[in-house]
Image (cartoon, rainbow, N blue to C red):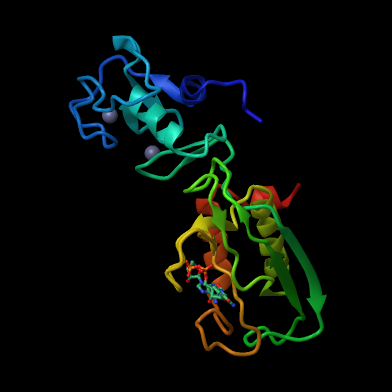
Amino acid sequence: KPGSKTPEEVVKKYLQKVKSPPEEDCTICMEPLGGPSGYKGPGVGPVSKAESVGRLAQCGHQYHFQCLVAMYNNGNKDGSLQCPTCKTIYGVKTGNQPAGKMEYHVIPHSLPGHPDCKSIRIIYNIPPGIQGPEHPNPGKPFTARGFPRHCYLPDSEKGRKVLRLLLVAWDRRLIFSVGTSSTTGESDTVIWNEVHHKTEFGSNLTGHGFPDPGHLDNVLEELRAQGITEEDALV
Ligand code: NAD
Ligand code: ZN
Ligand code: ZN
């Protein structure tokens, strides 16, 4: 837990100094980088002129320091930061998936489009509960519909790699979140996060089934957008 670091210290860790800010607007507050941050909210302390603008070390995008701190404070404060322009992730991104269980096993049947291998079935189970500080409405109950949810992957080399990365995503609480379901419109409920799963086995009535030749590559791309890469599959 990065609990000992203040938001300012976390943000500073990912920044390089900027001597003279460019004549551009900060895309967080839309005010010129040469002037003060447009963000004046609670928890944003004063900052010296020399530190008022920072450059994210990897992608190079520049923002008001106080705007980045405000953005960090709006998130789940897990010690990671994501560039709002190019989505580069600094540190290890985690989500707000509620407590539950992820299990998987091989089943001796082939998926449409993957005739040469067996299949992996993943079973996610999340019970309803009470929202924590990391959720949209802390203290309020959340529902959990349609659990256990069953999902399928081909038991191929690539399918097993996707499984290993999904296990990492689960540990980082990135498979589900709590919010409003776009399918049912229900709020304060457990919903899929931004990694697509196939929940139909032998048919494709919902569009979440097989065959779908691009599926595994799409999932790898969606996992990458969450900061989970093939290197995470090696450990
Ligand atoms: P959502 O509707 O907010 O959608 C979030 C993402 O999940 C989207 O990308 C969407 O494409 C994808 N998604 C939607 N339906 C999916 C499905 N059936 N299989 C795989 N991916 C799907 O998220 P949500 O509310 O978590 O998803 C809705 C699905 O959840 C339902 O189709 C159903 O499978 C399940 N559900 C079941 C019940 C029930 O009582 N049995 C109730 C609500 C939801
Ligand atoms: Zn700004
Ligand atoms: Zn960037």
Q: Nearer the viewer, residue 183 or 202?
A: 183
The number of numbered badges drawn on the structure is 0
Residue 21 falls left or right of residue 105: left
Relative to 232, is 198 above or below?
A: below
Relative to 153, is 209 above or below?
A: below
Query: In percent of the image, x 81 and y 75: which residue is there?
Result: 106
Residue 180 lies, in percent from the top left, at 45, 62
Query: In percent of the image, x 18 and y 26: which residue is there?
Result: 23
Q: Quadrant of residue 44?
A: top left
Q: Nearer the viewer, residue 31 or 54?
A: 31
Residue 51 falls left or right of residue 191: left
Relative to 53, is 25 above or below?
A: below
Query: In percent of the image, x 57 and y 82: which residue is there?
Result: 209
Query: In percent of the image, x 43 and y 37: which residue is there?
Result: 74
Is any part of residue 100 visible from this angle?
yes
Relative to 189, is 75 above or below?
A: above
Residue 59 lies, in percent from the top left, at 41, 36
Q: Quadrant of residue 70?
A: top left
Is any part of residue 155 visible from this angle?
no
Residue 194 lies, in percent from the top left, at 50, 59
Image quarter in which the N terminus is found: top right
Residue 90 lies, in percent from the top left, at 51, 35
**Residue at the extreme front of the image, as rendered:** 140
